[in-house]
Image (cartoon, rainbow, N blue to C red):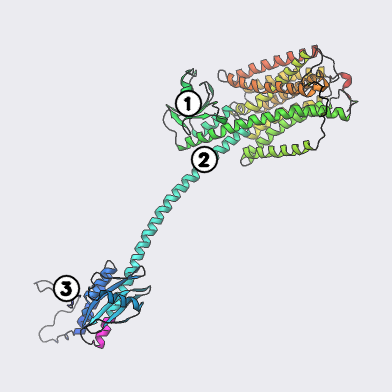
Amino acid sequence: MVSRRAHSLHRRPSHRKGSLPRGGVGRRPMAVRGELHPPARTRADHALLDLAALSRAQFGAPDEVEILRLAMDHVAAAGPYSAEAGYLQVGGDLVPSPRNGQTHASAVGRRVRELAGRDGDVAFPGRRRGWALGLRGPAGLHGYLVVTSRSRPTEAERSLLALLVRHTAAALSAAVAHRRQREDARELHRLREERTVLQQQLISVMAELGYERAVHAVMADVAASGGGEDAVTRALHRLTGLPALVEDRFGRLRSWSGPSRPAPYPEPDPVHPVEMLHAVARQTGPVRIKDRLITLIRPHGEILGVLALVDAGDEADEHAVLALEIVWRDLPGLIAGRVLNGAGLGLMASTATTYLHDLHHEVRPERTGSVLPGIVATAANLGGRATGPLVAGAAAEWLPAPLITAQAIFTLAMTVCLALVLCTPETVDLELPATRPSTRFVLRPGGRRSFGAAGALGAFAFAILGLISSLGASVLHGTLHTDSHLVVGLAAFLMFGSAAAAQLVLGRLPLPRLLTVGAVVFPVGLVLCAVALYHPALWLYLVAVSLSGAGSGLLFKGGVERAGSVAEPASRAGVLAVFFVVAYLGMGLPSVLFSIALRHFAVQIAMIGFAAVLSCGAVVSVVVALRDRAPGPGELSAGSARPF
């Protein structure tokens, strides 16, 4: 049981010489002899002073446990009371104070819990009655103070006890509020720290996503503009600020963008590249080997080469690695997509050309040798090739996600074409006798040389078309310093559009005159291309590609007509298919050779050599085609150029 002796919280005044009693500053000096003395303090006055001191101590206590202890220790200041027990409300339960006595502890605790927040009597065997006084505040019950009395308390003593209980409850309310305020402050501080961390992470993620979108956008621009390896390395150098390169699987340099390019480029070790490729293939993502960050180019699992960043100063950060990873992921897909597109176009072009000839023959069999099917086929072929780059360039310049947008437009156009094809009649007799031999590629007697000349015309005509399509973007960016994707598409549009326009305007000319005009215009355009690169001028370059396209269109039309004229009617599809294969080889192979030449020569010198070879080849092919004229119903003559 708690001691019945009340502990005073007042510090007794010092009687040492020169000291002042507490609170003596500012008071009236002690009465001198002859003056009246103040009245003596009563017991009630002392009790009120003790309770005031107790209240100050409680409001300065560190926690609720100390507040309850002070109330239990000084309850005797209010009268003939003794503190038997104290309880604090913690988490919905009443927790006994450490100063509680062990006698009747369980019975007292059970009785207090039965009161459920109300005040009530508590029986103590062999003693006077006791009371459980609730310590309540604005937030509810904070606990209980259980007291007993040695004698019957007076009204004043009851009031003093009630005042002590109210002060204790107020101190507990303040302590609970302060504790919750501290907890809220700590929680707020924790939440602010978490918010700061999350904001930093969000900023980092947003920056990374923004950078990733920028890299994808650059790669989409490269694909939409028809750029090759040079465009990829140039884009990677622009994104990272580091030299970027592409090597084939044997270590030979294919493209370099940025400073510090070795001159001459070192010859590869025949063993080291294989070991390096296997080492990189075992890793995920870019791998650092000496001063390079390397990743493999391997569409469908086949290693074609490496894409690398030269980082001699160890300056590559996570953004450079991210750019390399994205380009590594995008490049094989772009290569595979372009291969599939090319294969599809090759299949459709020859089939559609043959179909137009057969359909015209079935509808108007009396007009054998008409130039209408050839004009429609070649104009549609080249007109579509002219529209495609222009649409792709406009999409890359003004529309979001240019690569996806361009492919979506292409897919929609192919869907419309498929619906139209399904509605067209079939021109092939599927019920031919089984004994009839297959005639996929049969030429008329004496037509081999003529077909060879026609194939050469198609190859040389498509060579300049393939060069401008694949490397025109690199020439415009690097030599003519034009960054507009629309201009890149415009150059291809003018070239293919001029080819189609020349066929439509001059398509009625006899074959000799048609080929002669083409053999003159074609070299002039190539010469102007070289001049435009020596004296960079965008307008001159656009004029040059237009003239080159017009000449190539006439040569290509002449080649188609010549190939069709030497084919047996039943094998026209096979002959034209071979012709288109030769033409597409001419479109691709010279572009590859030109890109190889750029590693050893300036673009101007390479263009002069390219123009000379193509011009001579085209002139020789025209001479052969006109000298060896195999007769046939498909051949054009001056008299056959009649209205359709």
Q: What range is drawn magenta here?
A: 150-162
Which of the two labelled residues, at mark 3 and mark 1, occupies the earlier sequence position? 3
Residue at (48% x, 37% y) in the render: 319
Q: In x, y percent, where is residue 386?
A: 71, 31
- Neighbour class for label 3 at 10 Å: few (<14), some, many (≥20)? few
Q: In x, y percent, where is residue 24?
A: 17, 75
Query: Disc 1 designates what residue?
Result: 278
- Disc 3, SS: loop
Q: Nearer the viewer, residue 303 or 27?
A: 303
Residue at (45% x, 50% y) in the render: 199
Measure the C-alpha gap from mark 1 to mark 2: 30 Å
Which of the two labelled residues, at mark 1 and mark 2, occupies the earlier sequence position? 2
Which of the two labelled residues, at mark 3 and mark 2, occupies the earlier sequence position? 3
Q: Magenta-highlighted stretch: main secondary structure?
A: helix
599 w.r.t. 223: above or below = above
Query: Disc 2 designates what residue?
Result: 211
Query: Disc 3 designates what residue?
Result: 11
- Neighbour class for label 2 at 10 Å: few (<14), some, many (≥20)? some
Left or right of 475: which side holds 378? Answer: right
Residue at (83% x, 29% y) in the render: 431
- The nearer-to-camera label among 1 and 2 is 1
Task: Residue at the far front: name it.
Answer: 435
Q: Is residue 191 magenta?
A: no
594 w.r.t. 321: above or below = above
